[in-house]
Image (spheres, rainbow, N blue to C red):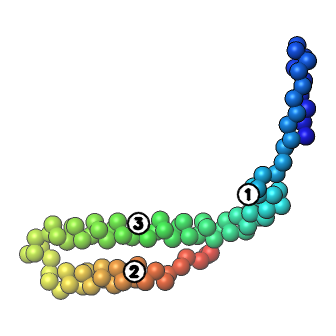
Amino acid sequence: EVTAEDMKTHKKGEIQITNEKGRLSQREIERMLEEAEKFKDEDELTRGEMIAKENLMLYMRRTRKAMDDIDQDKILKRDRDRLEKKLEEVDIWLDQGTAKAGKE
């Protein structure tokens, strides 16, 4: 409970401060901060994975565009087929999402 008084008019007022329902306690806040610190390294790895996958998808998009732009006579069919097969393999690998980065 807090009391305040206006020095000029001498009016007094009181207010009671209570822990509102739904608010976190100091203990809960500290626990959440500890958990955040605990998982910080894992979060950084996950972020790195996401960036690497996005970069790989961008590279694949550029490669496909370049293949579409190349005159059929400038690349051997065998090479085009091999490249298309590798791009499909990478698509499958990305769709599976099983690759995880590790600390090295």
Let me know if residue 58 appears in the view. Answer: yes
Q: Nearer the viewer, mark 1 or mark 3?
A: 1
Q: Nearer the viewer, mark 3 or mark 2?
A: 2
Element assignment for label 2: helix
What amino acid is found at the position of numbered circle 1 in the picture?
Gly
Let me know if residue 30 appears in the view. Answer: no
The quarter of the rendered structure image containing the C terminus is bottom right
Residue labelled with disc 3: 55
Give the residue drawn at x 14%, y 81%.
76
Residue 2: x %, y % from top left: 90, 36
Give the residue drawn at x 10%, y 70%.
71
Residue labelled with disc 2: 95
Residue 85: x %, y % from top left: 27, 85
Give the residue drawn at x 81%, y 58%.
25
Q: How many marks?
A: 3
Instruction: Measure the C-alpha gap from mark 1 to mark 2.
Output: 40 Å
What amino acid is found at the position of numbered circle 3 in the picture?
Asn
State which quadrant residue 14 falls in: top right
State which quadrant residue 39 falls in: bottom right
Residue labelled with disc 1: 22
Viewer-nearest residue: 20 or 89: 20
Instruction: Classify mark 3: residues with Cα within 10 Å, few (<14), some (14-19) or many (20+).
Output: few
Q: Is residue 62 left or right of residue 28?
A: left
Element assignment for label 1: loop
N-terminal label among 1 and 2: 1
